[in-house]
Image (tube, rainbow, N blue to C red):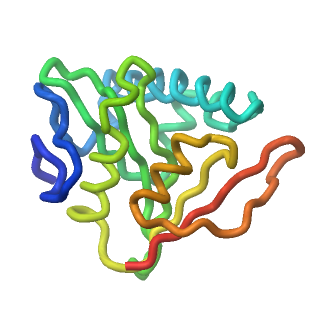
Amino acid sequence: MPEHRLAHSSSRAPLPPGMLIRELDLSDVTVAATVHAAGLRAYAVEAELIGFDGIPALSESLQDMTSLPLRWLGAVTDEGTVAAFVAWQTDSDRAVTHIDRVCVDPAWFRRGLASCLLDHLLAEVTDSGEVRVSTGADNQPAVKLYERLGFRRGVDFEPAPGLRMAQFVLHR
């Protein structure tokens, strides 16, 4: 996958200067450790937002994370810092893409990185078809992001006591 300085041509803001979007190779131990640490910081913020500290990714080991059958796309600085990432998998018939996680390191909040990554993923990487994602129902920044990108909210569900999740679907 080629590197890109901007998300696909749209009305969205470009990536910050010195930032590019590229596929992340989690077989590289340094990249994997950086992604894992950024994810832990991002999920700690989400845990506060939704009032639930049992988010599975918060207790996920580096080995657990790298063993997942996911593809990874990151917003990376020229120095190699992973500021944000998205991870997903597509069904074998390529009809449904499941976004497993969208994380922005808190040091990089409010710079449009999640929007740029999702824009790029939807325009350049995934096939047409359905895209599914879920987030804590009380994670308003994520809820607003998915709604702004055209995802439709489905029925909320509670996978664990005290954890209400919102699910979203985008039909393309």
Judge whether residue 164 can be spotted in this image: yes
User: Percent from the top left, x then y, of residue 54?
Assistant: 76, 32
Question: Does 61 appear above or below 15?
Answer: above
Question: Does 75 appear above or below 120?
Answer: above
> Image quadrant of residue 75?
top left
User: Percent from the top left, x then y, of residue 122?
Assistant: 31, 63
The residue that appears at 10% across and 41% down in the rendered structure is 5
The residue that appears at 31% across and 67% down in the rendered structure is 126
Residue 26 or residue 121, whichever sits in front: 121
Residue 75 or residue 50, whichever sits in front: 50
User: Percent from the top left, x then y, of residue 37?
Assistant: 47, 21
Judge whether residue 59 can be spotted in this image: no
Judge from the rendering whether residue 35 lies leftward or rightward of residue 56; answer left or right.
Answer: left
Judge from the rendering whether residue 119 lies leftward or rightward of residue 46; answer left or right.
Answer: left
The residue that appears at 52% across and 21% down in the rendered structure is 41
Figure disc tally: 0
Question: Does 29 appear above or below 147?
Answer: above
User: Percent from the top left, x then y, of residue 71?
Assistant: 37, 52
Judge from the rendering whether residue 79 lies leftward or rightward of residue 94; answer left or right.
Answer: left
Question: Does 124 appear above or below 50?
Answer: below
> Image quadrant of residue 123?
bottom left
Residue 120 or residue 29, whichever sits in front: 120
The residue that appears at 50% across and 46% down in the rendered structure is 101
Name the quadrant of the C terminus.
Answer: bottom left
